Amino acid sequence: MIRASAAALVAATVFLYPVLAAAAPAVEASLRPQARPSALADMEFTAARASHAGFDAWVADFKRRAAAEGISAPVLQSAFAGVGYDPEVIRLDRNQAEFSRTLWDYLDSAVSDTRVRNGRAALDRHRTTLAAIEQRYGVPAEVVVAVWGLETSYGSFRGSNDVIRSLATLAFDGRRAAFFEAQLIAALRILQAGDTDPRSMRGSWAGAMGHTQFMPTSFLDYAVDFTGDGRRDIWGKDPTDALASTAAYLARFGWQAGQPWGVEVVLPQGFDYALTGRAITRDPDEWARMGVRDTAGRAVPDHGPASILLPAGARGATFMVFDNFGVIERYNPADAYVIGVGHLADRIAGGPPIQAEWPRGDRALSFSEREELQARLTRAGFDTQGVDGRIGPNTEAAIRRYQTAAGLIPDGYASLALLERLR
Ligand SMILES: [Ca+2]
């Protein structure tokens, strides 16, 4: 799901929960990691409604607000014709219970052999269209296809929920009322513009729409009509407009043609792990002088300033990541998602699997364990700048300080072993 706005979600790490995957069969399910909507972070939280009593009255009130925002009476009437409260949407919203996966478990299915094979087939099938999209936006066909592959398994799981119904239910419900009401207004603007009709506007239960799962506000800002028929159709069978819209989105956030998202690298013996992490960037030449090499033993070419990322600590794979990593992050801020898109794109293009082993004996920390880790680090004098269960830059920095003080490798990795050491 594209972020609704730059401020809508804060950075997440490898904390994932499946949105469509839970309902879909086998490994080809959609894999959309998202920042968990933390109750602590969710300032819009008010008392969630206990039932759908009052939904119709809410719709009547909402229609007045929408009309004041310029939505016409005919659009409102057709959009809400037959639309009632959807209890299933609320059940799914409440069921976003704690669910965490390790990065390697995620990548095993995000970049499975099946998904790679299907991605190559999709690339073949749409080669001409994708070449034209790449020509216009400068985003490689493989990257666009990889986003498509992770969002909806190349269009197979676009979501069958009536978007107006889902968004109205979520806006009425109140848990994130302001967010979903803004999305609902945006969805109505799309209908008013004539891009689609109300009952063809289908998506996930949370309102992410079409082949590459645009939220309505993102659609308004970034979707394009690439077929030239005057409509931006991301919902229908033909993925052209959706794929072009994805490329347009990535281009808008600064995708640099010719630059990789990242390259798997190997660190030399004695490397200073305090230099790892997104906060520190160096030119590839400087990394090369320190002995950083790609998996074939070569210096990484100069694609611009780069950071060394250890998403699973010193015992897992290491990546040199470039500015384009941050561009994919604008689609979804979870490291796992960015690495998933980047690596899937590389594999579709014929690249090798990740060479390093992962610490497969480790399990993911639960939400409460991550909170405990933050609380214990802070109490021990390594301030994580808050306890929210999210392992972001502040927590990673605190872990590194703790590790350095304790004589451990400062890789910033939030492991169970680290938590147990702090207990
Ligand atoms: Ca079109």
Image (cartoon, rainbow, N blue to C red):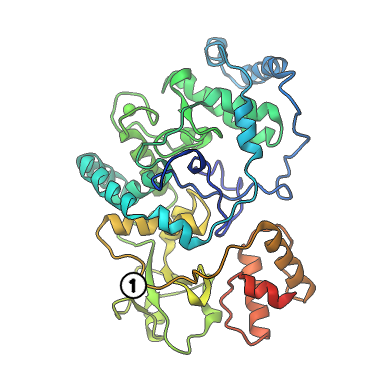
Type of amino acid at the residue the image marks with label 1:
Asp
Query: Do we see residue 330 in this rendering?
Result: yes
The verdict on label 1 being within 8 Å of ligand 1 is: no
Percent coordinates x, y for residue 263 in the rendering: 36, 68
Percent coordinates x, y for residue 34 in the rendering: 55, 49
Q: Is residue 104 above or below residue 317?
A: above
Q: Is residue 359 above or below residue 270?
A: above
Farthest residue toward the bottom?
270
**Mark 1, other Cα within 10 Å: few <14 / some 14–19 / many ≥20:** some
Rendered residue at 49%/72% (across/down): 359
Percent coordinates x, y for residue 70 in the rendering: 58, 19
Judge from the rendering whether residue 391 lies leftward or rightward of residue 251; answer left or right: right
Count of picture labels: 1
Percent coordinates x, y for residue 164 in the rendering: 55, 23
* Residue on which the image places disc 1: 302
Q: Nearer the viewer, residue 361 or 206?
A: 361
Rendered residue at 32%/79% (across/down): 299
Rendered residue at 68%/36% (across/down): 176
Q: Nearer the viewer, residue 292 or 64?
A: 292
Q: Quadrant of residue 341?
A: bottom left
Image quadrant in which the C terminus is located: bottom right
Q: Is residue 217 above or below residue 257?
A: above
Q: Nearer the viewer, residue 323 or 314?
A: 314
* Disc 1 element: loop
